Image (spheres, rainbow, N blue to C red):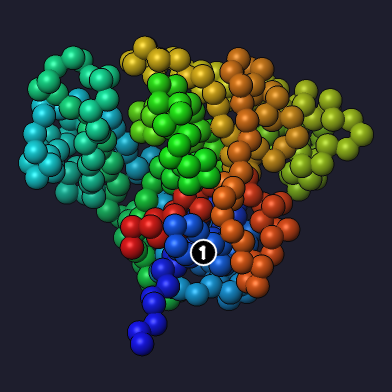
Amino acid sequence: MLKKKIKSLIGLDIGSRTIKAVELTREGHGYVMTGFGQAEVLSEEQRPDAILEVLRENAFHTKRVVTAVYGKSVIVRYLSMMRMPDEDLRNAIRYEADKYIPFEVEDVIMDSQPFPDDGLSDGSDNEMRVLLVAVKKALIEDHVSLLHGIGLQPTIIDVDSFAVGNAFELARGGSFYDDNASRAIALLDIGANKTNINIFLGGTSYFTREIYLAGDDFTHAIAKRLGLDIEAAEARKREMGSHPEEVMEAVMPTFDDLANEVLLSFDYFENQFDREVEEVYLSGGGCRMPGVEEALERTLNRPSHRWDPTEGIEIHEGTVDSSIIRESAGQLAVAIGLASRVQEM
C-alpha cells in the first residue's frame, strides 16, 4: 500500500533583525505548525549563519522553502489596461513595462495578475485592473543563491506585503471577506526598519506601500530622549517599567510621523476608489511595544486591532513549543503567509 505524501513547506522570513521560519503541514482541510525557529541577525555577513542556526537547532521535515523580497528593488503597480485574454497579458505588460517601472526591462523579473471584475473600474467594459510586480533579477538571484548555498530548495519567492495578506486570510477565513465584502481594511505590519501597508477590499489587495519608519525608529527616539544606549532603549521599549509615560512621550513624534504617512496612503486609496478605510489590523515586531495599538487608533482615527497570525493553526507540541509561539505570534505574519503557499502544492 502506498504511503500518502505529506505536504510541508517552510515560510522563511529573512528580516533585517530576526530570521523567522515556520513550517506548515497540510492535514485534511487544515494546517498544522510542525516546525518553528528564529534567530537574531547581528550583521549582513552573519545572515547565512543565522538561517543555518534556525534550521539546525529546530526540527523541520522539509527543505522546501518560500521566502519574500522587499525594498526599493521591488516594484508593485496597480494598472488599468485594455481588457484582453490572460495569454496576451504577459506580452502586453512586457511591451509597455517601461511606463510603469524605473528599471530596464531586461534587468527585472515580472509577474502580473488580472483582478476579478469588481465594479470599481472606470465603468468601461473594455478595461480591467491588473497587478504588476517587478523585481530586480539581481535581488532574486541573491536570494536563490543564499538558499541553495545552505542546502534549501526555494519553491516560491513572494513579496512580503502579500504574504501578510495571505496570513490574515488564513487566520480569519474566507468568510471574513464574504461578511465584509464592501468594507476596506488596512493591514499594517510594523517591522524593525519598515512598515508595510496593504489595503484590502473584499479579499483583494488594492494598494500596498512600504514606509521606512518602524520599530528601530521607536528605539532610537527612546534612546535619544532618555539618554540610553540602543540595547537599553530596546529593552525599555518592550518593558516600559514604572514610568511608561516617559517612553510614550519619547516615541509620540515618531508615531505621528508614521501615522501621517499611513493617512496619506489612506487618502490616496479613498480618492481613487471612493471607499473609506474603516479598520486597521496590526502585526509585526514593532507592535510588541505596549501602547502602540491605542496610539495608532488615536492618531489614525480608526479602530485598530492586533491580530494573531497563528489563529486557527494547530500547533504540533512534539516539535513546536506553543508557549514560544504565543509570545512571538504577532511577529509571524510574513512567515506564516509564506508557508501557507503549501496549499498550492
For image coordinates 39% across by 82% down, the residue present is 3
- Furthest toward the right, the residue is 242
Which residue is nearer to you in this view: 20 or 85?
85
Using the rendered image of the protein, determine whether residue 147 is visible from the camera's viewpoint. Answer: no
Q: Quadrant of residue 101?
A: top left
**Image height of 239 relative to 186, above or below:** below
- Decide: few, some or many residues near mark 1? Use Cα within 10 Å; few <14, some 14-19, many ≥20: many
- Furthest toward the bottom, the residue is 1
**Quarter occupied by the N terminus:** bottom left
**Image height of 67 relative to 115, above or below:** below
Which residue is nearer to you in this view: 129 or 233?
129
Left or right for 14, reference 327 = left
Which residue is nearer to you in this view: 268 or 171?
171
Residue ID for mark 1 = 23
Location of residue 31 in the rendering, given as x and y in whole percent from the top left corner: 50, 59
The secondary element bearing badge 1 is classed as strand
For image coordinates 63% across by 71% down, the residue present is 319
Location of residue 67 in the rendering, given as x and y in whole percent from the top left corner: 42, 57
For image coordinates 23% across by 45% down, the residue present is 111
Of the residues shown, which amino acid type is indicated by label 1? Answer: Glu
Q: Quadrant of residue 56?
A: bottom right
**Quarter occupied by the C terminus:** bottom left
Left or right for 148, reference 60 = left
Left or right for 344, reference 54 = left
Left or right for 127, reference 173 = left
For image coordinates 21% across by 36% down, the residue present is 114
Location of residue 9 in the rendering, given as x and y in whole percent from the top left corner: 44, 65
Location of residue 179 in the rendering, given as x and y in whole percent from the top left corner: 46, 28
Using the rendered image of the protein, determine whether residue 202 is visible from the camera's viewpoint. Answer: yes
